[in-house]
Image (cartoon, rainbow, N blue to C red):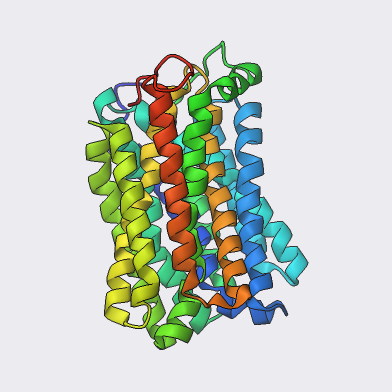
Amino acid sequence: MPGTVRPFWVILALAIGAFAIGTTEFATMSLLPYFAPDLGVDEPAAGHVISAYALGVVVGAPLIAVLGARVPRRTMIVALMAVFALGNGLSGLAGSYTAMLVFRFLSGMPHGAFFGFAAMVAASLVPPHRRTQAVGQVFLGLTTATIIGVPMASWLGQAVGWRWSFLLVAAAALACAVLVALLAPRDVPDRRASPRRELSALARPQVWLTLGIGAIGFGGLFAIYTYLASTLLEVTGVSDAVVPLVLAAFGVGMTIGNIVVPRFADRALMPTAGVVLVWTALALAVFPLVAGNIWLLTLDVFCIGLGGSLGTVLQTRLMDVSGAAQALPAALNHSAFNFANALGPWLGGLAIAAGYGLTSTGWVGALLALGGLAMWLFSLLVERGAMPAQAPSRGA
């Protein structure tokens, strides 16, 4: 990278894109009670709008990463943010439930590839021993969204209509595209890069195991968060005005987690991932026990938010286990997390529909976190030679 490049400003520009993504990803969940009646559907059906976005991430991340293997990273990021802005702008204008499903799918497609390319750019700007911290700084845009963007979107949804929330996201995405075009260094893709080389990463067992940790272990967080607004209104019994404050507590937890946890991960990556999964499982298991008390519930939501740092840790882990094929695994990390975004709400919805109540999402979430922990343990055993696999990578 050129010597005149200032990592802080580049990472800030990338963090604005993460802010836009985080706002739309999490605010859509909190807006369920508001856009469901406007689109003429009940809340379980409206939850499919969230799943449509998540499936867009799952499909778009690998497709874009493979096809864009030879495209400069800066160009990819600008293009991805432009498409993301378009999808969210159209979501704000959707006139029907079907149109909303289509536009949310379109909005989700750039998500994973953006984070994958942004993480690689951020990591390339700092010394190797600070990679996870640099990635975490990009992710701070996402966590800040849960403190500022999501409550703002929730307030807009209540005050002037949910459509303005998506238009706000579109504006932030356009700002990111412009700033990255102006600030990010010009880069020349590796001449050896190709779709075939990117696909070769899929032959590495540790890539799949790392993705599995996120796909299962992170599902619990989304199981809780998707129905958090409804739980607060119907179980805890708070007013609409309190909902954004509890959502902000979740965001504060995620932000602190992404500041503190990467410092430990840069020293001991896999042990840190294991600790985060145990913490998350415990916090999710406590959720049904404290749902009736707004103060204890808010504290628990903060603790659940701390577990959001798992995404940053696994992003660096994938850099370590992917060899020369970096783009596809980096993007697939967000496919995995958005598979979790689809899995958690779906299983939580099944538990609610079966009559176990809104708080049952806590037990569903705890089981998913324990499933991710089991996958983490298996990955660790494989890498340390307790089970047959490839030669150990340098990520543990």
Q: Foreground: 337 or 155?
A: 337
- Residue 324 is left or right of residue 35, and the answer is left
Q: Foreground: 211 or 181?
A: 211
How many numbered callouts? 0
40 is higher (above) or lower (below) than 13: below
Percent of width and height locating residue 337: 51, 47
Percent of width and height locating residue 102: 73, 58
> Can residue 247 be seen here?
no
> Can residue 377 be seen here?
yes
- Which residue is located at x 59 percent, y 31 percent? 65
- Which residue is located at x 35 percent, y 20 percent? 394
Q: Foreground: 101 or 392?
A: 392
**As drawn, which residue projects farthest toward the top?**
192
Q: Foreground: 168 or 43?
A: 43
Q: Quadrant of the C terminus?
A: top left
- Residue 196 is left or right of residue 237, and the answer is right
161 is higher (above) or lower (below) than 344: below
- Which residue is located at x 54 percent, y 43 percent? 336
- Which residue is located at x 51 percent, y 52 percent? 173
Percent of width and height locating residue 218: 46, 51
23 is higher (above) or lower (below) than 135: below
Q: Quadrant of the N terminus?
A: top left
Percent of width and height locating residue 219: 50, 54
- Residue 202 is left or right of residue 159, and the answer is right
- Residue 260 is left or right of residue 333, and the answer is left
